[in-house]
Amino acid sequence: MSKKKRRKYTKEYKEEAVRLISEEGYSYAEAGRNLGVNSNLLSRWKREFEGIELDPGSAAAMQAELKRLRKENKRLKMEREILKKAAAFFAKEQK
């Protein structure tokens, strides 16, 4: 009887998977299907990379939070620009 080998993932692969969820807006299930990874595993990777499992007062946790907030800020700015362009397009279309 042969045992299944555990798959090992590189840190870069995990970061890219977490990026799909946090920045690209994929759901855990959708990203999991696309990558062939269980959604529970993706959830754990996201917690690890965002520093949730770290002590809240530690410098590493602060850095992780700062990184997360910068990413969120970038995404929100991009969404705002898209909405501005859409509003201008529809305003022009009504005239």
Image (cartoon, rainbow, N blue to C red):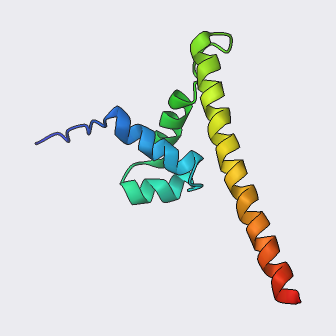
Near-viewer residue (60 or 94):
94
Q: Residue furthest right?
A: 95
* Image location of residue 78, percent across then percent down: 67, 54
Q: Is residue 37 left or right of residue 84?
A: left
Q: Residue furthest top?
A: 58
Above or below: residue 76 compared with residue 89: above
Above or below: residue 37 compared with residue 82: above
The residue drawn where x is 56% and y is 54% is: 24
Q: Residue furthest left?
A: 1
* Image location of residue 60, percent across then percent down: 57, 15
Q: In which quarter of the image is the N terminus?
A: top left
Q: In which quarter of the image is the C terminus?
A: bottom right
The residue drawn where x is 62% and y is 40% is: 71
Is residue 82 among the parts visible in the rendering? yes
The residue drawn where x is 60% and y is 30% is: 67
* Image location of residue 23, percent across then percent down: 58, 48
Q: How many marks?
A: 0
Is residue 52 among the parts visible in the rendering? no
The residue drawn where x is 81% and y is 80% is: 90
* Image location of residue 40, percent across then percent down: 49, 43
Q: Is residue 93 left or right of residue 51?
A: right
Q: In which quarter of the image is residue 91?
A: bottom right
